[in-house]
């Protein structure tokens, strides 16, 4: 393979990883780690040409997303997740996504008219919509997200108020992530996007970086998303 072809292939890899929700720093760190096999944050930062001050945050995010594995010790060492395991998980998540889309399509066809799904752009607006959903909930909130730390910063007070109202709150997030006190927590690796269902009546599906989301107040869609999250919870 000549240099031009290699550069073109590299660009395709970067584009594909971006579509999977990785930032530029995360892509550089992940590709560097694949070439290294194993390494400390300092070595990875040097090879990936990312700031050393950002390395731990980037690597923690990659681990949360299921792309790498860390081992305890000093220094902390990192290695890529087995690529076949990673491939299988991503394929499974894409299949689940298309099952959701096919269900949405089937509802549209059955009803013979559009069932409104609102699109919200911008992280601040997405967080505002999530807060609004939590504030309007009366019985149950289900949150599946790899970004529970970010949600806590923005909507922890809303969650506290919901708990005081007697709302049952279920959170599915990555292992070792702190969850708000009082919620029912389930730990699952490899979560990429954020799904929220309130009272089985409204639902929100957000992008990996929480900068865009789709929202619906269609109970049928909300109940179907609840079904998918329950399947995720029950998986070993």
Image: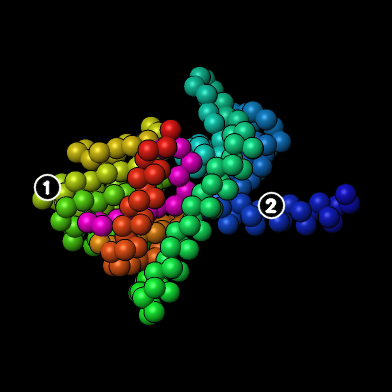
Which of the 4 image quarters holds residue 111?
Answer: bottom left
**Which one is earlier in the sequence, the residue at label 1 or at label 2?**
2
Is residue 181 among the parts visible in the rendering? yes
| Magenta span contains residue 103 | no
Q: Which residue is mark 2?
A: 13
Color scheme of the displayed model: rainbow
Q: Which of the pair 14/55 is nearer the observer?
A: 14
Please tell me which residue is depicted at 40% across the width and 33% down the height of the picture: 175
Q: State which region is magenta.
A: 188-200
| Label 2: few (<14), some (14–19) or many (≥20) C-alpha neighbours in 10 Å | some
SS category of the residue bearing label 2: helix
Indicate left or right for 63 with 49 as reference: left
Which mark's residue is nearer the viewer, 1 or 2?
1
State the mark number for residue 219: none
User: Quadrant of the image for the C terminus?
Assistant: top left
Residues at marks 1 and 2 touching, judged by CB atoms closer than 8 Å: no
Across and down, in percent, residue 89 comes to 55, 42
Across and down, in percent, residue 58 comes to 52, 42
State the mark number for residue 166: 1
| Label 1: few (<14), some (14–19) or many (≥20) C-alpha neighbours in 10 Å | few
């Amino acid at each position: 393979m000549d240099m031009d072809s290699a550069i073109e292939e590299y660009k395709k890899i970067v584009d594909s990883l971006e579509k999977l929700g990785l930032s530029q720093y995360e892509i550089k760190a992940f590709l560097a780690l694949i070439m290294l096999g194993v390494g400390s944050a300092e070595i990875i930062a040097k090879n990936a040409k990312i700031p050393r001050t950002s390395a731990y945050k980037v690597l923690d995010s990659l681990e949360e997303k299921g792309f790498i594995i860390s081992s305890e010790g000093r220094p902390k060492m990192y290695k890529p997740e087995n690529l076949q395991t990673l491939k299988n998980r991503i394929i499974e998540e894409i299949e689940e996504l298309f099952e959701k889309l096919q269900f949405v399509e089937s509802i549209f066809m059955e009803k013979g008219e559009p069932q409104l799904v609102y699109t919200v752009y911008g992280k601040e607006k997405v967080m505002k919509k999530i807060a609004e959903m939590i504030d309007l909930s009366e019985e149950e909130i289900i949150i599946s997200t790899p970004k529970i730390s970010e949600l806590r910063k923005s909507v922890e007070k809303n969650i506290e108020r919901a708990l005081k109202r007697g709302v049952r709150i279920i959170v599915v997030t990555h292992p070792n992530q702190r969850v708000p006190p009082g919620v029912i927590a389930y730990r699952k690796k490899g979560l990429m996007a954020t799904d929220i269902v309130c009272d089985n009546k409204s639902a929100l599906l957000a992008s990996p970086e929480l900068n865009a989301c789709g929202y619906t107040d269609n109970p049928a869609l909300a109940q179907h998303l609840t079904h998918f999250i329950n399947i995720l919870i029950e998986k070993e």
